[in-house]
Amino acid sequence: MYTVTIDRDKCEGCSECVDNCPASILEMVDGKADVTGNLEDCLGCESCVSVCPSGAVTVAES
Ligand code: SF4
Ligand code: SF4
C-alpha cells in the first residue's frame, strides 16, 4: 500500500496529476489536487509525482 501526499500550499492547480493517475484516485477540490479515492487502489506508479510542475506530490510505500 502507498501513501500519497499532496502539499496544497505547493499545488498550482494544473490538474496534471488528476489527469494522469491510472487509478483515478485524485480529484480537484477547490482548485487544488486531493486524494479522494481509495489509497488501496494506488499502483505506486508515481505518474502524479512525475507530471507535477511544483513538486507538490509525494508517494511513499507504507
Ligand atoms: S502513484 Fe500512480 S496510481 Fe498512485 S496516485 Fe500517483 S498516479 Fe495515481
Ligand atoms: S500536478 Fe501538482 S500542481 Fe498540478 S494539480 Fe497536481 S499537485 Fe497540483
Image (cartoon, rainbow, N blue to C red):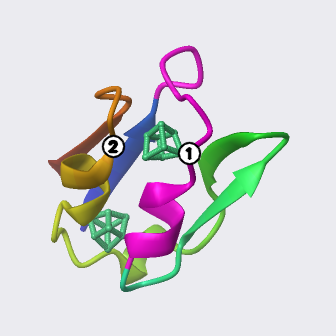
**Mark 2 belongs to which amino acid?**
Cys
Quadrant hosting residue 9: top right
**Mark 1 belongs to which amino acid?**
Cys
Q: Is residue 40 above or below residue 51?
A: below
| Relative image position of residue 29 (x, y in whole percent) | 79, 48
| Relative image position of residue 21 (x, y in whole percent) | 39, 74
| Relative image position of residue 27 (x, y in whole percent) | 66, 62
Q: Secondary structure at mark 2?
A: loop
Quick check: is 8 in the magenta stretch? Answer: yes
* Cβ at disc 1 under 8 Å from ligand 2: yes
Instruction: Specify the label residue 14 is tagged with.
Output: 1
Q: Which residue is mark 2?
A: 52
Q: Are marks 2 and 1 in contact (CB under 8 Å)?
A: yes
Magenta segment range?
7-21
Q: Which quarter of the rendered image does ligand 1 occupy?
A: bottom left
Quadrant placement of the N terminus:
bottom left
* 1 sits left or right of 61 in the view: right
From this viewpoint, is residue 24 visible? yes
Give the main secondary structure, helix, strand or loop, of the magenta stretch.
loop
Return the residue nearer the eye: 40 or 49.
49
* Cβ at disc 2 under 8 Å from ligand 2: yes
Residue reaching furthest to the right? 30
Q: Secondary structure at mark 1?
A: loop
Dot 1: within a 10 Å radius of its alpha carbon, few (fewer than 14), some, or many (20 or more) residues? some
Return the residue nearer the eye: 61 or 28.
28
From this viewpoint, is residue 62 visible? no
| Residue at 24 percent of width and 48 percent of height | 49
Dot 2: within a 10 Å radius of its alpha carbon, few (fewer than 14), some, or many (20 or more) residues? some
Q: Is residue 30 above or below residue 23?
A: above
Return the residue nearer the eye: 35 or 29.
29
